[in-house]
Image (cartoon, rainbow, N blue to C red):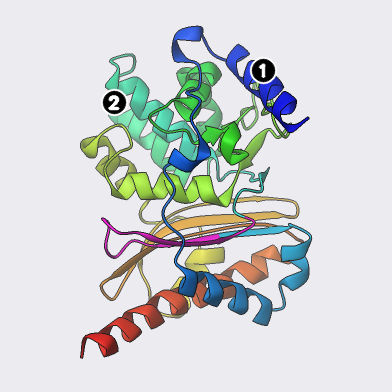
Amino acid sequence: MRKKLLVIVLAYAMLLVPASTAPVVEDPATAMIPPVDAEMQYELEVNLRHMGLAAALEQKRLAVSLVDITDLQNPQYAGVNDRNMMYAASLPKIAIVLAGFERIKAGLMDYTPAVKEMFTNLIRFSSNTDASRAIQRIGFGFIANVLTSGAYRLYDPFLNGGLWIGKAYGGPNDYWRRDPMHNISHGATSLQVARFFLMLEQGRLAGPAYSAEIKEILSKPGINHKFVKGLSSIGVRDVYRKSGTWKDAHCDAALVEHDGRRYIAVALMKDDKGGEVLPQLIVKLDQIVMRRAQAGAVAAD
């Protein structure tokens, strides 16, 4: 039954794009996933439960991914419900920018100051107007091609989906297609968002030069809430982030640089109090990474 379902999903997914750019099918064992660090995984699970989030975890209303990338050649990963695809509001707008730079790289769009401003506004200030304008200019199909391509596999049936843009954020021609696996319009898994930021830091999003441009666009967050609010409370300023909020959907994702450590944190939560939980959560995630640094220093001595 499972095999039959997978065949149906793949067949449907291939209908979304031309045959020449159909999703590459590979065994999940070969997927580009950082190795799980057992100690960090344990700390993550314990801290989440100590925060009173056990019910949200068990009901799969909370997904979290944490990647220590201080040693970029040896990233260490921990995640809970990380392959559970959820409605992610504006967080998937990162996919619009990636597809935009792929279109620019292909010579199909010019990278003008106006385009940079459009990308910056839809990321830093989560402008729905600019997001819709960018989607219409880039094209839904082109975005889907990029997300399902072998180069990225940011939406992959073997990984239970991932990033998806199935509708714009208001305006004419707003609707396109919900994702073929979960019927979500703006979807994400914490694992695939974490992979996006990992590839960003590795210079693999449309190449090193455009990766640097994307990172710059993700800097200087214009909305002080969730992860940014929590990190500001402990004096962390170097944050490259994109958040999302709609009704009870509260999401955030960031690449954080703190006292010589670098890490990626992603949280997707379906809860009315998610906006209060996420600032506390990022502080806990930061503590996990910084404790690892202290433990490493002690071991080196």
Q: CA distance from mark 2 to mark 1?
A: 33 Å
Image quadrant assignment for residue 31: top left
The quadrant the N terminus occupies is top right
Q: Is residue 2 above or below residue 172?
A: below
**x, y percentage for residue 195?**
44, 47
The label nearer to you, 2 versus 1, is 1
**x, y percentage for residue 200?**
34, 45
* Closer-to-camera residue (238/26): 26
Q: Is residue 272 left or right of residue 83?
A: right
Q: Which mark is residue 268?
A: none
Residue 173 in view, yes or no:
no
Which amino acid, by three-letter code, is at mark 1? Tyr
**x, y percentage for residue 73?**
26, 55
Residue in the image at 28% along x and 26% along y: 112
Disc 2 + disc 1, Cβ < 8 Å: no
Residue in the image at 29% along x and 26% along y: 111
Q: For numbered disc 2, what is the local secondary structure?
A: loop
Sequence-wise first label, 2 or 1: 1
Residue on which disc 2 sits: 111
Image quadrant assignment for residue 159: top right
* Closer-to-camera residue (30/90): 30
Residue on which disc 1 sits: 12
Residues rendered magenta in the picture: 65-81
Which amino acid, by three-letter code, is at mark 2? Tyr
Label total for image:
2
* Closer-to-camera residue (1/64): 1
Q: Is residue 140 left or right of residue 182?
A: left
* Closer-to-camera residue (237/8): 8
Residue in the image at 41% along x and 43% along y: 32
